[in-house]
Image (cartoon, rainbow, N blue to C red):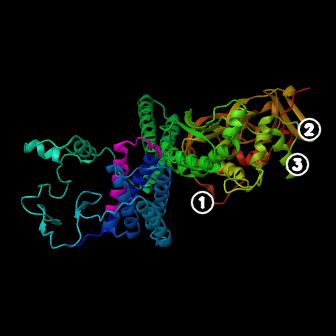
């Protein structure tokens, strides 16, 4: 009987990715002056697992590289070699190369062998420099502990294991430990329990306790999780979305029922609504991942960049347990990476500069995530020099970017999001190429978010990203315009008011609303959507105050129809892209309502949006 090993590839890829991330974190956490034995063992085991699994599946590039890496790590954990910064740097470079190679195999591509050879050469150079020998790899267990891989040798006769599944090399009947190939041979300490013998030296005991495998007599524990393809989760989310729509339809039909059955029906509908909501929340939680999945890659980014720039930087991670939609996490990586790099490159000063102004030599960058209502707030905070207003305005003049020299700081900071904007004195491989912040803003808006900046000269800057919890379902306010229903995402709404005539100003046929000590430009939704029969006089209508990434405006609507959670349906997929519309949803009565794209509507607001004091 032949076994198709390809069916196990996905499990190997996922587990190897976890091993690599663990190795990277452990390497950066190592205290090189007094390395923790268990940390070294953990790094070694991760490399050993990848080597064993890749050997079974025939991923030679992975196994070859991890074999040399494992040899160096083995010497380090045995205490025969001492790790230093240069060694850790090479090991981290090897982890990066392993990630690239693993992704190549995952994508069914041929790995870059010259890069693999170069990585092996770097490791061998380190080993040769310390006068060490490379382990042959004989008599080592594979990553799963199921096989003992030993090259063909007349000294290793082959026998069937107890279950008859695999051929196993053994030394002799007397020397066999009876573990059936599932566990490492017993350590001298374990054997001493059964057979009294002179105690080994203290140094031997310490080493063997640190590296011995769990006892084969330990009781296995059941896994508390399973791996499920994300496509199945997405399908389930869609079905639950349809269930929510059906429940809304039943609730609307129930309003017309009269008589003795009405009370019973209402109770049943309330129970259905409660159960549907719980199912929806449970299914949505399956798509949620902790922010630590993204945050954990940044210690490496900060370490490498601060070293390259000659700066002392400490990264603090807060709120890693905050959960967010998996699809959004994947799209957040690039914007967050750019913002963190910017904070270190532009924000944090050099050691000398910080000493001159009386700051701690080590700068601090905080990456924080927290849930606020139905949205997630991610902050990148640094205690650096802060943004330079004069330099930004001068660059705006140079690049011919429209601006008001007297605009408040909040609007000056937003100028850095203009395409090609950069205040870097020179172009480096870190920054100054005139790209990045505009892409950051566009990517964040692409997942329904917005970004705000606050900065104080000499004290630092904060970049705050506001995001919805998920891309599949949105909490919105239903508004009516000329008899048609639209949904405004709640995350963008500041408040809703019915203004007085005194609050409305008209300049060049454009209406402005004076509120909160600011003039807010008004966007008439009925005009933008070409709807007849809507209320056109602002003091008779309702104004929904909207805050987008860099603009504030008032949205003129006829009335508010209440808050509702709606399932987002792609309009572009089934029809075409419509300006001002982010998607569509099906309401309880079966009708279709458009979900507004507030970022697109913000571009329709007038130039008089600049905040000015009322005369």
**Pointer 3 or 2: first along the chain:** 3
- The residue lying at 24 percent from left, 47 percent from top is 212
Asked whether, in this view, residue 264 is left or right of residue 506, the answer is left
Marks 1 and 2, how far apart at CA: 40 Å
- The magenta segment is 28-52
* Image quadrant containing the C terminus: top right
Q: Which residue is mark 3?
A: 397
Marks 1 and 3, how far apart at CA: 41 Å
Q: Position of residue 560 (x, y in %)?
A: 67, 34
Asked whether, in this view, residue 263 is left or right of residue 164, the answer is right
- The residue lying at 23 percent from left, 67 percent from top is 150
Q: Which residue is mark 1?
A: 573
Asked whether, in this view, residue 272 is left or right of residue 512, the answer is left
Q: Which residue is mark 2?
A: 507
Estimate how packed mark 3 is, as few (under 14), some (14 to 19) or many (20 or more) residues with alpha carbons within 10 Å.
few
For discs 1 and 3, the disc positioned in front in the rendered view: 3
The secondary element bearing badge 1 is classed as helix
Of 127 and 138, the residue lying toward us: 127
- The residue lying at 37 percent from left, 42 percent from top is 36
Q: Position of residue 23 (x, y in %)?
A: 42, 51
For discs 3 and 2, the disc positioned in front in the rendered view: 3
């Amino acid at each position: 009987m032949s076994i198709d090993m390809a069916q196990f590839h996905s499990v190997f890829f996922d587990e190897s990715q976890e091993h690599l991330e663990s190795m990277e974190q452990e390497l950066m956490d190592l205290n090189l002056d007094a390395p923790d034995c268990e940390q070294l063992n953990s790094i070694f085991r991760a490399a050993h697992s990848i080597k064993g699994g890749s050997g079974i599946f025939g991923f030679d590039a992975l196994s070859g590289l991890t074999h040399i890496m494992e040899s160096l790590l083995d010497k380090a954990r045995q205490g025969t070699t001492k790790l230093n910064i240069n060694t850790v740097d090479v090991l981290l470079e090897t982890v990066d190369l392993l990630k690239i190679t693993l992704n190549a195999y995952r994508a069914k591509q041929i790995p870059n062998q010259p890069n693999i050879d170069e990585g092996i050469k770097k490791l061998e150079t380190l080993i040769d420099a310390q006068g060490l020998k490379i382990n042959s790899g004989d008599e080592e267990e594979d990553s799963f502990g199921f096989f003992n891989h030993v090259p063909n040798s007349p000294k290793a006769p082959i026998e069937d294991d107890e279950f008859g599944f695999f051929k196993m090399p053994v030394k002799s009947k007397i020397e066999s430990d009876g573990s059936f190939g599932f566990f490492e041979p017993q350590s001298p300490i374990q054997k001493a329990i059964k057979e009294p013998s002179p105690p080994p030296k203290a140094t031997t005991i310490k080493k063997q306790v640190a590296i011995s495998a769990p006892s084969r007599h330990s009781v296995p524990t059941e896994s508390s999780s399973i791996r499920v393809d994300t496509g199945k989760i997405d399908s389930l989310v869609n079905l639950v979305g349809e269930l929510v729509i059906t429940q809304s339809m039943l609730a609307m039909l129930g309003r017309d029922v009269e008589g003795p059955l009405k009370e019973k029906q209402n109770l049943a509908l309330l129970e259905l609504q409660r159960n549907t909501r719980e199912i929806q929340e449970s299914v949505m939680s399956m798509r949620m991942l902790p922010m630590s999945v993204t945050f954990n890659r940044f210690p490496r980014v900060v370490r490498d960049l601060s070293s390259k720039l000659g700066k002392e930087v400490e990264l603090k991670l807060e709120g890693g347990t905050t959960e967010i939609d998996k699809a959004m996490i994947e799209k957040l990586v690039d914007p967050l990476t750019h913002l963190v790099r910017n904070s270190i490159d532009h924000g944090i000063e050099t050691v000398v500069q910080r000493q001159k102004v009386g700051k701690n030599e080590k700068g601090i960058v905080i990456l924080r995530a927290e849930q606020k209502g139905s949205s997630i707030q991610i902050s990148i905070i640094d205690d650096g020099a802060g943004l330079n207003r004069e330099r930004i305005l001068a660059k705006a003049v140079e690049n011919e970017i429209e601006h008001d020299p007297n605009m408040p700081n909040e609007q000056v900071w937003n100028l850095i999001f203009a395409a090609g904007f950069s205040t870097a004195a020179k172009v480096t491989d870190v920054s100054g190429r005139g790209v990045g912040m505009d892409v950051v803003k566009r990517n964040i808006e692409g997942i329904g978010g917005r970004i705000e900046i606050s900065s104080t000269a000499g004290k630092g800057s904060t970049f705050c990203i506001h995001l919805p919890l998920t891309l599949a379902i949105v909490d919105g306010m239903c508004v009516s315009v000329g008899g048609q229903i639209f949904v405004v995402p709640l995350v963008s709404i500041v408040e809703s008011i019915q203004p007085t005539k005194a609050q409305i100003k008209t300049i060049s046929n454009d209406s402005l609303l004076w509120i909160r000590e600011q003039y807010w430009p008004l966007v008439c939704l009925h005009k933008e959507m070409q709807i007849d029969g809507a209320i056109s006089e602002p003091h008779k209508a309702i104004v929904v105050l909207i805050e987008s990434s860099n603009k504030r405006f008032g949205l003129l609507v006829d009335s508010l129809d209440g808050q509702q959670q709606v399932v987002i349906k792609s309009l572009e997929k089934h029809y075409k892209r419509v300006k001002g519309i982010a998607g569509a949803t099906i309401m309880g009565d079966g009708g279709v309502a458009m979900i507004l794209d507030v970022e697109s509507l913000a571009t329709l607001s007038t130039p008089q949006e600049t905040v000015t004091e009322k005369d």
